[in-house]
Amino acid sequence: MNSNNQHIRKHIITALVENQPGVLARIVGLISGRGYNIESLNVGPTQDSTVSRLTMLVPGDDRVLEQVTKQLDKLVDVIKVTDLTRETFLNRECILVRVAATRKTRSEIIELADVFGCQVIAVRANSMVLQLVGEQDIVTDFLELMKPFRILDVSRSGVIAMASE
Amino acid sequence: MRTGAKCVVDAIRDAGVKTVFGLPGGTVLDIFAELYHAPFEFFLVRHEQGATHMADGYARATGKPGCCIVTSGPGATNAVTGLATANMDGIPMVCISGQVPSSMIGNDAFQEADTVGITRAVTKHNYLVRRTDDIPAIIAEAFQIAKSGRPGPVLVDIPKDVQRGKTEATFSGTVNRRGMKPIYEGQPRQIAKLAKAMNSARKPVILAGGGVIAGGASAELTALARKAKIPVTTTLMGIGGFPDTDPLALRMPGMHGSVAANSAISECDLIISVGARFDDRVTGKISEFAPHAIKAHIDIDPSAISKSVVVDLPVIGHVKPVLRELIKLIEPADRREWLARCRKWCTESPFAYDAKETQLLPQFVIEKISEVTRGDAIIVTDVGQHQMWAAHFYQYTKPRTFISSGGLGTMGFGLPAAIGAQAACRNRNVVTIAGDGSIQMNFQELVVAVEHDLPITVVILNNGYLGMVRQWQEMFYRKEYSAVRLAQNDRARNEKIAERPPAYLPDFVKLAEAHGAVGMRVTRKNEVTSALRKSFAIRRPVVVECIVKPDENVYPMVPPGASLTEMLQSIA
């Protein structure tokens, strides 16, 4: 592929797929088999029980992404593919993060958490668990701020997204 | 009430299949019990790879989906190469595999393999059938998917208990999958843009690929090219889509393409791919492919557009209706200068070999096959040097007369694919052109041709080498011939075997006879024509082994990664 004029950026791809066994394996196999990367992947049911929505965060230039969407679209089990990054869209990610927290640092952590509208969902003698739901950039910023306190564990849902209109 | 197995056989019948290829085993015994009463012919292969290539050859010769049945585990894994071959070349095929009973799936049962998992990447679609009730609809859908859009192989994996179950279910009507939406008619706006570009181009070239064959559009292509006066180069998959005998024919492009095709591509100001996917063997170095040209691409598969070569004028649609529309919009143009230039390349640098050579040359044999059959046979090749010579030295004038594994390059394809082609076209001359390397990969299937009275002619061009690899080692690996010598002399130090090797190992004449076919050996030029004539007159399976010059190379050759202008005509 041409290496000039490329803008590597993260694309959010959503696909409506048949809610059937093996469909996820088919999609993941296609992505890995053709050498694309996925940064996150989220699958869940929709209002139609026969259809699932899949949201993927895929880094790459426009040509790679064009191929990813076309190859996905070619699958018989894939009903519709959209590269949301080409439209205006809403995105959210949910994270759970366990940070080291002593008596000294606890209040500072809670203060920062408040700024982000983050909930404290468990407190232990030496750590606490926080929950944050927000745009992916904000979630990532928040994790950066938590780093100095020592992050013990993180669980991220992966981004989910929807076109604005 | 029907059993699942009965539903399978009925659905195959309803799909209009006339011949089924396969090999039984524990998990397909119920289907085979039903096959015993089936209204179509069954070919018992000797290896499941043979069954897939036969179904493939049947499909390539007719355009209708081929069908094969294999058992679970090793039966299914043996089918993988054939599925991948068909998948790469877009060949419609339905493969039915047995699976261990549902309750045992995942238990590492005897002859269990995750067939759906293994074949996912080499099929257009596949199914694990979970309920007997689903069988009629799934098999109808499998045939529909195999044929629609860019065709391809579909595998249906059916556990034994699902075959044995009973159902009232039937399927009639049309298949309608919401995820399956091939676009047949091209967008008028895109077609108009392309027509405009064609009308104003001074030096256009058409690159015709497998889509012309699959889409049955060779008449439209020929009409368009003649009306617009545009020269045509046919890719390996497109051979026969445009007559080699036409003055506009530039023959094959690419790594072993003609001087005319590669020069025209390198100089043209517009290249129109008609169902050709810009394979790397066609383009050479992508950045230097058709550097002065506007690139147009007509394809039914949207993912083929701008996959390798970035396309300026895409038309997504079936080639046949798109070409029909284009013909209407094309204005006759004066391209005498460009056509003269193309003709000059054709006449000055045709595919050629040393006619003065006294040893039997493989190219000479193929020219004689072309003469004897008057270009009217179905030629089926294996993969390697002989495949390229079969593309160069036989004159093809009709679609579906050249059958070859293009994308996957599957050695061992030729003989079983020829059996499938001959099974579908009993009255045609079917000739396999193979190398001594390729033919040994599926020789066992010759018995199937004998059993079914299929008068195929198998021409083995025996040069004692894995010739194409030998050629690469000669040109790019310091003439160190590692693991390519099939004959017993002149081997690498660590490959020595027999103390007193027999004259021929294997002896293909005896091997043919042992399989119930006729064997002949040709060693001299003046024996070729009579041997070929005899082989066609016998109307039985015949193996004609031609002992050819061992170190003949395929030229022209564009070295891997080089531009199409860097054609080698001999070793420097």
Image: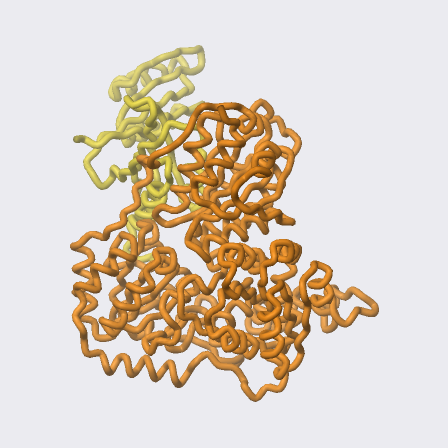
Chain colours: A yellow, B orange
Quadrant position of the N terminus of chain A in the picture? bottom left
Q: Can residue B210 be seen?
A: yes
Residue furthest to the right in view is B499
Residue in the picture at 29% in, 20% down? A112
Location of residue B82 with respect to B286 vertically, above or below: above
Location of residue B376 with respect to A48 vertically, above or below: below
Quadrant position of the C terminus of chain A in the picture? top left
Return the x and y of residue B127 as percentages of the image width and height: 47, 35
Q: Can residue B284 be seen?
A: no
Q: How many marks?
A: 0
Q: Quadrant of residue A119?
A: top left
Name the foreground residue: B184 vs B490. Answer: B184
Drawn side of residue B278 relative to residue B481, left or right: left
Return the x and y of residue A22 as percentages of the image width and height: 45, 31
Residue furthest to the bottom in view is B356
Location of residue A59 with respect to B295 vertically, above or below: above
Return the x and y of residue B347 as percentages of the image width and height: 38, 84
Q: Quadrant of residue B60?
A: bottom left
Residue in the picture at 24% in, 51% down? B185
Drawn side of residue A46 relative to residue B467, left or right: left
